[in-house]
Image (cartoon, rainbow, N blue to C red):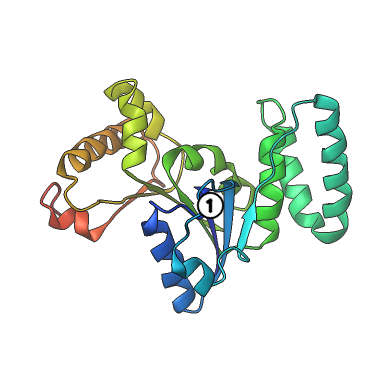
């Protein structure tokens, strides 16, 4: 399969769980392309980054120019470029961005084109804030599987505004949710589970909602089937 992995920063020394997932997919013969929103600030890298040539597999997504005119000129250049290389992807992205009620998102425009032109079978997004931003990719490319994986970082962001804030924060319209449980993080697992289940109760009118849970989380005893 062709798998697009979307992360905030890659490579990052502390996020070994993302590194292990990517190398595991490569070992199984999958084609993986990493899309990173930001460049890393760390100079020390894990040995697997060089061993699996992960930097060569990484695409750093562009930023939006501050000037509106520079942004528009850049968008015209991308229009001409993808009109000849990936016209179908360009048409689908523009159809979505121009048909919705929200203002035209140049950031989503510049990010959607390189991701979808990779022709992924699966889009795997790490962290809830990225899932919130990139879920329109599922609408643009409905046949592509879309998965958002939440981590403890998402809970910490939500706790800054209290429990109600995290309920709204995690209530993004993704079809597949997965919770990653870290060893010894029992408190975070309970809080994160509570928030996710609260979201599910708010979203009961969505029959297509599927909740995926890590098997290790079930073994902790916080939730039993």
In the displayed structure, would residue 96 be above or below residue 57? above
Pick out the residue farthest to the front.
43
Which of 41 and 85 lies nearest the eye of the viewer?
41
Residue 149 shows in the view: yes
Please state if 151 lies on the left or on the right of 19 as rendered. left
Residue 204 shows in the view: no
Q: Which residue is mark 1?
A: 6
The quarter holding residue 66 reads: top right
Residue 225: x, y in percent? 15, 54
Pick out the residue farthest to the left.
221
* Residue drawn 57% across the image and 50% down it: 36
Please state if 60 lies on the left or on the right of 92 as rendered. left
Residue 207: x, y in percent? 38, 44
* Residue drawn 27% across the image and 33% down it: 195
The quarter holding residue 85 reads: bottom right
Total number of numbered labels?
1
In the displayed structure, would residue 173 be above or below residue 43? above
Residue 9: x, y in percent? 52, 48
Which of 154 and 39 lies nearest the eye of the viewer?
39
Please state if 154 lies on the left or on the right of 43 as rendered. left
Please state if 74 lies on the left or on the right of 27 as rendered. right
* Residue drawn 85% across the image and 46% down it: 79
Residue 168: x, y in percent? 38, 27
Query: Where does the N terminus fall, quadrant-wise?
Result: bottom right
SS at mark 1 in the image: strand
* Mark 1 neighbour density, 10 Å: few (under 14) some (14–19) many (20 or more): many
Which of 45 and 147 lies nearest the eye of the viewer?
45
């Amino acid at each position: 399969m062709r798998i697009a992995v979307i992360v905030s920063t890659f490579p990052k020394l502390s996020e070994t769980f993302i590194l292990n997932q990517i190398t595991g997919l490569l070992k199984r013969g999958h084609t993986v392309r990493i899309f990173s929103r930001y460049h890393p600030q760390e100079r020390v890298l894990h040995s697997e980054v060089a061993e699996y040539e992960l930097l060569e597999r990484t695409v750093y997504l562009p930023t939006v120019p501050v000037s509106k005119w520079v942004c528009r000129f850049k968008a015209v250049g991308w229009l001409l470029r993808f009109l000849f290389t990936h016209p179908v992807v360009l048409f689908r992205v523009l159809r979505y961005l121009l048909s919705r009620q929200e203002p035209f998102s140049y950031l989503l425009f510049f990010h959607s084109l390189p991701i979808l032109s990779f022709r992924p079978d699966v889009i795997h997004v790490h962290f809830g804030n990225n899932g919130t931003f990139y879920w329109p990719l599922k609408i643009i490319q409905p046949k592509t599987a879309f998965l958002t994986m939440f981590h403890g970082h998402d809970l910490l962001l939500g706790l800054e505004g209290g429990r109600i804030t995290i309920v709204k924060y995690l209530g993004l319209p993704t079809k597949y949710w997965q919770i990653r449980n870290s060893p010894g993080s029992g408190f975070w697992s309970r809080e994160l589970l509570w928030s996710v289940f609260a979201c599910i109760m708010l979203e009961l009118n969505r029959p297509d909602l599927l909740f995926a849970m890590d098997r290790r989380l079930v073994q902790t005893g916080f939730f039993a089937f």
